[in-house]
Image (spheres, coloured by chain):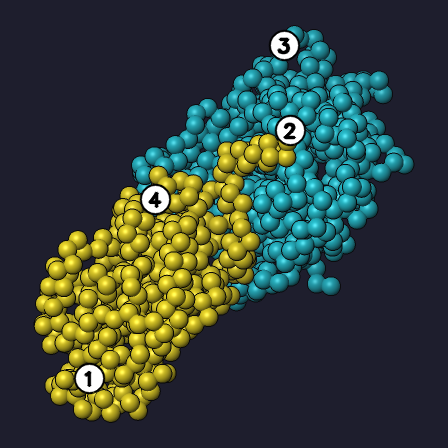
Chain colours: A yellow, B cyan
Amino acid sequence: MSEEEAYQTVLATLKKEAIYPYTEDEMQVVKSIESCINCGLCIQHCPVVAAVGLDRFSGPRSIAVELSRSPPEYWTTADVVYLCTGCGTCREVCPKDVDIPEIVNLIRARIFKHRPDLMPKQLHTADAIIVEHGLAFVPWEDPEEKAESRDMRLERLGLRYIPDQVVKGADVLFYPGCQAEERAQEVKESAKIILNHFKVKFTLLEELNCCGLPATLLGDDKTALELALKLKKKVKDLGVKMLVTTCAGCTSNLARIAERDAWGIPVYHMLEYLVEEIGIAKLSSAFKQSTEEEPLRVTLHDPCHLIKHTSRITMDYAGQILGLIPGVEVTQSYAHDSCCGGGGLVSYHAGDVARAVMKENLAAIEETGATRVVTPCPLCTAQLEDSLFRQGSSVEVDDMTVFIAQRLPQEG
Amino acid sequence: MAKYDVIVIGGGSTGTAVARDCAMRGLKILLLERDDIASATTGACAGMISSGLKYMDEPNIVDMCSDEVVNFKRIARHVMEKNPIITPLLEMSDISSGGNFAEEYSKRAETRDVPPVLFLTPEDSLKIEPTLNPDLIASIYFEEYFISPFALCMLQALDAKQHGADIKTYCEVTDILTKKGSITGLQYFNRITDKMESAKTKAIVNAAGPWAHKIAALAGAKLELRLNKGAHVILDRRVVNVGVIAKAIEGRMIYLFPHENTVLLGTTALDTWEDPDTLVASQDEIEYLLKSMEWVIPSIRDARIIRTMEGVRPLIPTWKIPEGDVTRGYEIIDHEPEGVSGLISFTGGKLVMCRHMAETATDLVCKNLGMESECKTHNEPLPGNSDDVDILALAKEYGVSQHTVERMRARRGSETATILELTCDHPEWKTTICTCEPVIEAELRYAIRATFPQTLNDLRRRVRLGTGPCQGTFCTFKAAAILAEELELSGEDFQLEIVDFLAERWKGKRQSIRGEQIAQEELAQGIYACVGNLDQALEELDYDLKPWEEVL
């Protein structure tokens, strides 16, 4: 038997026995589970377990320990592993640094590759859109309709339109992400207003493509990698010094892939950029010139992709920035850092679970007495808006980038 | 006094196989086991239904092993799995017994539905097993079948029972009665009823493994064994994709085999005179295994060891040669020539041969009893081997997670549906009791009712309770409560069960404890001593520290 025939024979057995060898990278992730001492903290803190109970979602510990011990049984996890919202709370509370969210991604990737029949069909639809369009959502068919929708949003919010610009050699690449590009266009527009106000030399991409996070979350690693590499090329071609985004998910994922693929530039969330690069002093004087001074009681919602996947400091910045705005009073919700249920693509196929996870946030928001929730993520904004509306609440929700843009002095 | 055609002593793989064979041939059978089914030598083996790879110099044995693999695939496929195995070569001298092995193995491969021995390039080897030492020059690849030894013995015992045999655990033979050189019966102490009992028979099959010489002595017969200790180190999960074989420091072959959801690193081989009941793996054995495997899997020392497992091989007494050169065949000794008619004993053997050993012994028993009969054990399936199990459908129907159902299937085969059926009347029995495995309450209840466990340790052998990385930290209390309810144990016995089980876990943990397992142990002791207050309760309980619990 030739060397190649021998290898193919082995692969045939491995396939039959459902043994798909872990790669070295995967081994590192799996290795982290060895530290688990089964203390149960992750179960106590998991928002999905709290919302739907262990019988429906067996919880982070079970994913890390039970479901990973025997790799050939990976396929049996399909009824559990797609219910994780990927909030990262488990990893944050773990005293032994077990990387449970990565294990979830790893298992999902195996199912996607070898048993796609077991993946929720809504996720297949989502994947097809990403593969076809390079975006998380089907893009607008008619550019005029897209512009109309944008203008309506701007008018409602009292914001002016700044045309898109693509500038080679700009300092900052502003990356709105799929949600702000295709749906919450006001977030993209607000970011441009802010950057413009502070006279930042910024550029947009000629053509946006998804950062790859949704593809990673549904297990399509190949597409995720393709998108990441495509994006890297675009970033390199523009020659920018840094990247700023307004989406929490994009922030964490771009930071990860920029490091992995050696982009050589830092990735900032808009809030980090404002505090660290623009500076509190400039922000403060800008807000003082603002005409919008109606007293407002707000509460913050912390996006998981910032606090649990990137850094908690971003939300400290959020508090600092709100503190500079005249008339704004912040009341903290007891569930300010609890997952909104919108992560991990759970709402695509298990809306009931996503809504159950959100419930705690809603009660906590109502209790603050705030009339507005502010959060620095267009996806959390959408999820919160939808749930508050369903509940018949009068509390409004603003993406924090929009909230800031509205409170800068109107120019021109 | 109860009267039996044959009494089998020993509930390991051989004893249960003999009981099954005899019962299937219509003999009235009693099986006596001093502890639990598969609680000693068999329970400490790696479960390999070996094609005879280590014994290629004994072609008859290789033939027999190969045939037995085919038989097991017919009767017990639901508790079997196939492991691809790689032997990385760091230098040419790492090839163990020369080209003879590849040829002998490959000759019989097709009948077992495995490819012949293959040679893989270093690149392909590393793709299959990235943890291998990248300096390898080539690797040898072949495939072997594995079985859960606990499941095999239990299924053989249950099948014997279904064919009318009496299976009694916790019954220790204290005397064998003879009259004019012929067996007439025996006496035993029943630990469950706390009473001496006796039974009449003309034929006794001594399948007591490492205690076989002591049983023979009760009848005044002589039996010599070469007892040899083997220890395994158990890792928390499958840290390798496939089995790995390596040459140990003194040239023996050792292995790393995926086993259920763990990996077994083994084994040592030391001639021993220790008491098999209190044997523990030594620090030297653990280091010997780690050092030997480290050459081919450099990361092995970083893996999490959850415990050790050790047993005693009852080898055929061949002296002044290394353990590895002692035949792995078996012998059946009829003690008639030395004046004890009706007693036959086993020495030697391997797990894969247990059915064959039973067939030969049963043939002899039948001949001695003057009856004609035909062995059917290789054709009739063991319980649970009948239908394929549709995991997805069952999980959906009963609202139990797919993983739980799949693990149950691996332990129970087609009985899975019967167990899940229990949750219709008792939806609360869907609760997960052992979270490492996992095991739900329904399976525990079923195992208690259908497979006669007396202790939590017995339940461990039935359902793998407490065998995961937490080593009973979270299941012991819950499982003890269920056992106490089912067996109507007193409050004191309930506490004793917990302490006994934790003590048995400690036996395997103590020698190997290191790294994360120390943190795990802190938590376990915190729960049971500090919160459960069992360290205080001990003073009130009738509990003697086990030898391995003594404070140095």
What's the mark number on residue A8?
Answer: none
Q: Nearer the viewer, residue A139 or A47?
A: A139
Compared with B146, B363 (above or below) is above
Q: CA distance from mark 2 to mark 1?
A: 74 Å
Compared with B333, A110 (above or below) is below
Mark 3: which secondary structure? loop
Q: Nearer the viewer, residue A270 or A324?
A: A270
**Horizontal placement of A254 versus B121: left or right?**
left
Q: CA distance from mark 4 to mark 2?
A: 38 Å
Residue appearing at x 42%, y 55% in the figure: A225
The residue beneath circle 4 is: A119
Q: Nearer the viewer, residue B385 or A234?
A: A234
Residue A340 appears in the rendering: no
Of callouts 4 and 2, the N-terminal one: 2
Extreme residue toward the right, this view: B320
Q: CA distance from mark 4 to mark 3?
A: 54 Å
Q: CA distance from mark 1 to mark 3?
A: 98 Å
The residue beneath circle 3 is: B373
Three-letter residue code for mark 2: Met
Nearer to us: label 4 or label 1: 1
- Name the subunit of mark 1: A
Three-letter residue code for mark 3: Ser
Q: CA distance from mark 2 to mark 3?
A: 46 Å
Three-letter residue code for mark 1: Leu
- Name the subunit of mark 2: A
Mark 1: which secondary structure? loop
> Dot 2, crowdedness within 10 Å: few (<14), some or many (≥20)?
few
The residue beneath circle 1 is: A408
Nearer to us: label 2 or label 3: 2
Residue B108 x/y as whole percent: 67, 22
The residue beneath circle 2 is: A1
> Looking at the figure, which quarter contains the N terminus of chain B?
top right
